[in-house]
Image (cartoon, grey):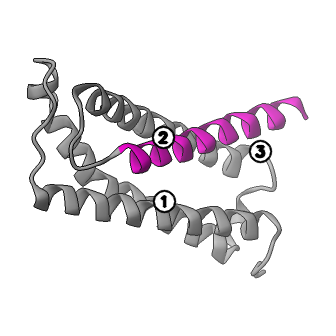
Amino acid sequence: MVINALFAFFHFVAAFGLVATLVFEWLSFNRDLSYSEARRIQTADTWYGIFAGILLIVGFLRVFYFEKGSAFYFASPFFHLKLTLFVAIGLLSIYPTIRFLAWRKETRQQQAPSISEQEFIRIRRVLNAEFILLVALLASASLMAKGIGFSQ
């Protein structure tokens, strides 16, 4: 069905967008950011949130209205793991987002943000944790899609 393919496409675009923006933040974040680097991270973080929202909405539409049906997904332990990991990543992402938003005062004046060593370490650790959990989420999505661990 064309509509199923269209929603799968939107889901994949959002998933790839989320992965790309997180990888960009992870690779770009360093101790001494320039103004332009900080602005790019702020923009990437905004897109990260947009992609996460689209992914969640389209994903649930696929669960309830398209694909294999909600019974399939809710019977899968990997679906539950995937949702748990998605929520954990979302909760972890709150701290960097708050810090990136706090840079606005400086970036609006076209200045690089001042980042303390402690703040740098915290953000770096959170980005690392998000990245690791995202890899686990992708693995659980593959296992779920193939029906592994399916219980009826």
Position of 48 with respect to 145 (left or right) is left
Q: What is the span of residues highlighted in magenta in the rendered image?
A: 1-28
- Quarter-of-image position of residue 140: bottom right
Q: Residue furthest top?
A: 109
Query: Which x, y percent locates residue 120?
Result: 20, 55
Looking at marks 3 and 2 on the same chain, the residue that comes earlier in the sequence is marked by 2
User: In the rendered image, is residue 15 in sight?
Assistant: yes
Residue, disc 1? 86
Whether residue 152 is situated above or below residue 115 in the rendered picture:
below
Query: Which x, y percent locates residue 89?
Result: 41, 59
For discs 3 and 1, the disc positioned in front in the rendered view: 1
Badges 2 and 1: C-beta atoms under 8 Å apart? no
Position of 81 with respect to 35 (left or right) is right
Query: Which x, y percent locates residue 26?
Result: 41, 51
For discs 2 and 1, the disc positioned in front in the rendered view: 2
Looking at marks 2 and 1 on the same chain, the residue that comes earlier in the sequence is marked by 2
Whether residue 122 is situated above or below residue 29 in the rendered picture:
below
Residue 66 image label: 3
Q: SS of the residue at dot 1?
A: helix
Q: CA distance from mark 3 to mark 1?
A: 20 Å
Q: CA distance from mark 2 to mark 1?
A: 15 Å
Q: CA distance from mark 3 to mark 2?
A: 27 Å
Residue 34 image label: none
Going 22% across and 40% down the picture, which residue do you hit? 100
Q: Is residue 25 magenta?
A: yes
**Hey, what amino acid is under mark 2?**
Thr
Residue 21 image label: 2
Q: SS of the residue at dot 2?
A: helix
Query: Which x, y percent locates residue 1?
Result: 91, 35
